[in-house]
Structures are given as structure tokens and as C-alpha cells.
Amino acid sequence: MRIMRGLLWKEWRQYGWIFGLAFIVISLEPVLVPISYWIYRVGDRADAWSYGIKAILAPGLSTTETTAMIVAVLLAALMLAGERGGGLNYLASTPVSRRQIIEAKFISGSLALAAIMAAISLFLLIAGHLLPAQYSTREVLLWSVLTTAALLCLFSLALLVASFSRGVLSSALFTAVIMAAPWMLASQILYMIRLFCQVSAVLELKARYIATYLFIPDYISRDGRYIWNSNPVIDRVAPDYPLEVVILLLAALLFLGLAIKIFEKNPLERQGELLLFGNFKQIGLLFFSFLGAMGWAGEVGTSLLSFLAYFFVMWLGIYLAMVLIVRIMAWVLQNR
């Protein structure tokens, strides 16, 4: 416990100002905008100040929620990948275990996000109680609990990615790709299947229903979690708040466990490459070339056999082209 308290104190001293900045950025629309309404008395109606808050609490992603997700990802990237090559290498060489390092970062970052959401929610509850408002207490509480759980899950996922990423930018980008992968893969696979055989609406609905539970932003949008196909909306997921909060928290713990396992095997002296999985850069190139080849082959293939032939040729070609581009860029940067 003494070591953990020391690590948590270190995280607070190092990132306290970033936590404060995160609060300002996330609370810009739900807190600062209403305050400006009160100061300048904008609008004719007494509840005009709550228009923007009602839009945040309503189904669908708002600017505040999108900003909060970006902040959660960047926060995890800064706290782990951002320290690579600096204080993190020194800390890993001390008697402190790598498990304790990850746990301290997870606890401090999660507490910061939870505190930010709690402060914003408390402001909304007090303001809605004292002044006429277009939203209810129930709306605030449901939004607060589910959004907080989603942000904690996303922060844990970003921490997992940061455990094997080289820098802040690469960590954030890889997190975005992994987060979007369920929808990308589901849409691509269903598109490929529809090219060569008939897909029943029931099968497609089930596939996209599963994908919506694997896509973290869908939890935040709640009633706006529509399931799409090539036509207009075919169904939408009714929110089950207790179930979804449990799923998100369990996923956060799973990502944390994976982050600990990977970080314990990560040779920091090799610029963040994974000893367990080899060169992660190559894995990323293979993944992006796979997606590109699948989409391209689907455009030119006229049968399943021709699709497979085009796919493997294009996969190899795109991969080799990307490797060549990466090496040229590395050579240019090295010889600047």
C-alpha cells in the first residue's frame, strides 16, 4: 500500500494540471455555456439556458460526449505511451513492479474521469433543481452513470494500446482503429458476403446487433443506437442500463488485465515493440493492407473465386507498398 500511495501521489503531481485541463474541456458545453447564459441573460424563456444540456442528455452523440471520449484516449496515451523513453524507463528499473505502475495509472486516470463526470452531473442536478430546466433528474443520472462507465472502458482500452505503442499519437490512432474495428469488420464482411450470396435480413440484423455491443460509443448514444444496412434504419437497440454498465466495467477490467500482461513483457528499450508479438508495426501494416485489399477486391471481383484471387494478390501488393513507404519515410527522417 505504501508503494501504491507513492505511485498515486506521483501520478497526481505529474498529471494534476492535465486532469484540470480535461475538466475544463469536457465541461465547456454543459457548465460554462449555461453560466454564460445566466451572466448575459440570453434567450426569452426562463429555461433557455438548458437547451444545450438537453441536447447532451438526449439520445445520440453530442459534442461534449465526443470530446470526453477523445480526452479519455489522449489521457491514457499521455500517461503511459507519453512517458516512454523518459520517466517510465527509470520507474520500471526501480523495485516497483510493472503491474503496480499500470494499476496506479489506471486508478488515477479513472478517478479523474469519474470525478469530472460527477462534478458536471452535480452541477446539472443543482442547476435543474434551482432553475426551470428542460431535463429531468433521471435523465442526468442515467446519462452520468452510463457515460462514466463508457469513458472508463475507453480509458482502459487506450491504456492497453499504450502499453505496446511507441508514442502518444500512435497510441491514440491505434485505439481509434481498434475501437472502430467491430463496425468496420462487420460492415466489410457483410458487404463481401452480399456480393456473392443472399444474406437474410435476420442474419444481418443479428450481426450488427452484436457489433453495436462491441462499439463503445454506441453505449453513450443510448436510444440513438440504430442498426443500419444499405437502406434506412432496420432496427435499434433499446438500452438496458444495468446490463450495459456491467458490460462496460467488466470490459474495463479485462483491458486492464491485458495491459498488465503485455506491459510486463514489453521491452521498453526496444522503443515499445512487443517481444511477445514481434514487431507491432508489421501487424498494423498487415491489418490495414487486409482491409484495403478486401474492399478493393470486392470492387473488381465478379465471382467468389476471382475475389479470393484478387484479394491475396492485392493484400500482398498493398502490404509491400506500405512497407516501402514506411522505410522511405524512416530513411528521409533519419537523413534530414
Image (cartoon, rainbow, N blue to C red):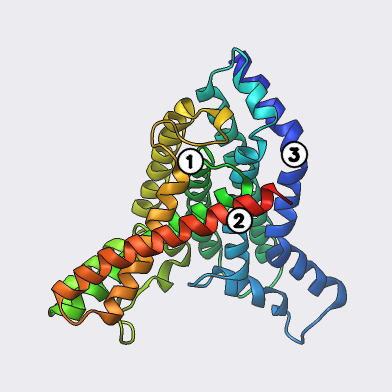
Badge 2 element? helix
Closer to the N terminus: mark 1 or mark 3?
A: 3
Position of residue 243 measured from the top left corner of the image (x, y, whole percent)? 34, 52
What residue is shown with label 2? Answer: 329
Q: Which of the 4 image quarters holds residue 240? A: bottom left
Q: Is residue 66 left or right of residue 218?
A: right
54, 175: nearer the viewer = 175
Position of residue 322 measured from the top left corner of the image (x, y, whole percent)? 47, 59
Residue at 58% x, 64% y is 66
Amino acid type of the residue that numbered disc 1 sits on in the rendered structure: Leu
Q: Badge 2 local density, few (<14 within 10 Å), some, or many (20+)?
A: few
Q: Is residue 75 above or below residue 300?
A: above
Badge 3 element? helix
Residue at 39% x, 44% y is 251
Amino acid type of the residue that numbered disc 2 sits on in the rendered structure: Met
Which mark lies nearer to you, 1 or 2?
2
Q: CA distance from mark 1 to mark 2?
A: 27 Å
Closer to the N terminus: mark 2 or mark 3?
A: 3
Q: Is residue 102 above or below residue 66?
A: above
Q: Is residue 205 visible?
A: no
Residue at 44% x, 32% y is 262
Q: Badge 1 local density, few (<14 within 10 Å), some, or many (20+)?
A: many
Q: CA distance from mark 1 to mark 3?
A: 22 Å
Which mark lies nearer to you, 1 or 3?
1
Q: Is residue 170 above or below residue 135?
A: above
Closer to the N terminus: mark 1 or mark 2?
A: 1
Which mark lies nearer to you, 2 or 3?
2
